[in-house]
Image: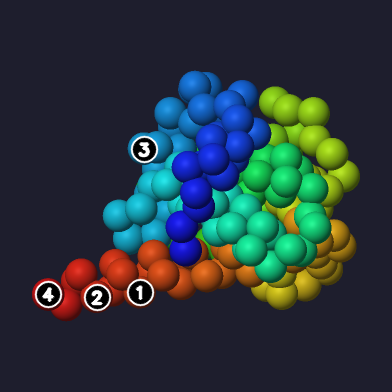
Amino acid sequence: MKLTKQENRELLQYLQSFMHTKETALMKRCIQHGRISTYEHVLSVARLSFYLNRRLHLGAPEEELARGAFLHDFYLYDWHENGYIGRLHGLHHPAIALKNASVRYNLTPGERNIIESHMWPLTLFHIPRCRAAWIVCIADKICSSYEVAAHSKSLRL
């Protein structure tokens, strides 16, 4: 999966308002999966979502898709630290991310749905209700699986 240079520029233009914030700096220090930071993870999900939407002609609004993908894990803590691991992070973090993003940004209904439903079906009652939310939900699972598998493989070397 590779975006063209033009597609990368377009994607980064949609995400420009997020790139130099204190929250993004924190996301760069928090680990998501293995050695992948939350920042790297959300960028991977945004890129894959953008790619799938373009290549499969899915018709999701691109700016909403990109912004929702970037904010889907906007919970702003390292869930591996301070005894948090094992406390159902997977169930709770979408609501925390939505609250954090809602305080800082003006979200569209689609962006809200992307953030709150990206862990479906784990979050049983928060179902993706728009194309962008379905795309991010799937892209997040693909990226997460890859990150976890890559980390597991590196542990065996």
Q: Secondary structure at mark 1?
A: helix
Which amino acid type is shown beneath numbered disc 4? Leu
Which amino acid type is shown beneath numbered disc 3? Arg
Kindly indicate the quadrant of the structure image that contains residue 52: bottom right
User: In the displayed structure, would residue 21 be above or below residue 39?
Assistant: above
Q: How far across and how far down the image is residue 43, in percent? A: 50, 46
> What numbered label is drawn on residue 84?
none
Q: CA distance from mark 1 to mark 2?
A: 6 Å
Furthest-left residue in view?
Answer: 157
Are circles 1 and 2 on residues that touch, CB within 8 Å?
yes
Q: Secondary structure at mark 4?
A: loop
- Report the quarter where the C terminus lies: bottom left
Q: How far across and how far down the image is residue 20, in percent? A: 49, 22
Q: CA distance from mark 1 to mark 3?
A: 21 Å
Crowdedness near tag 4: few (<14), some (14–19) or many (≥20) residues, C-alpha within 10 Å: few
Are circles 2 and 4 on residues that touch, CB within 8 Å?
yes
Left or right placement of residue 139 versus residue 118 in this view: left
Q: Dot 3 corresponds to which residue?
A: 29
Which amino acid type is shown beneath numbered disc 1? Ala
Crowdedness near tag 2: few (<14), some (14–19) or many (≥20) residues, C-alpha within 10 Å: few
Q: N-terminal of the two: label 2 or label 3?
A: 3
Q: Dot 1 corresponds to which residue?
A: 149
Q: Dot 4 corresponds to which residue?
A: 157
Crowdedness near tag 1: few (<14), some (14–19) or many (≥20) residues, C-alpha within 10 Å: some
Q: N-terminal of the two: label 1 or label 3?
A: 3
Q: Nearer the viewer, residue 78 or 20?
A: 20
Q: Secondary structure at mark 3?
A: helix
* Residue at (81% x, 67% y) in the render: 127
Determine if residue 51 is in view.
yes
Left or right placement of residue 54 versus residue 16 in this view: right
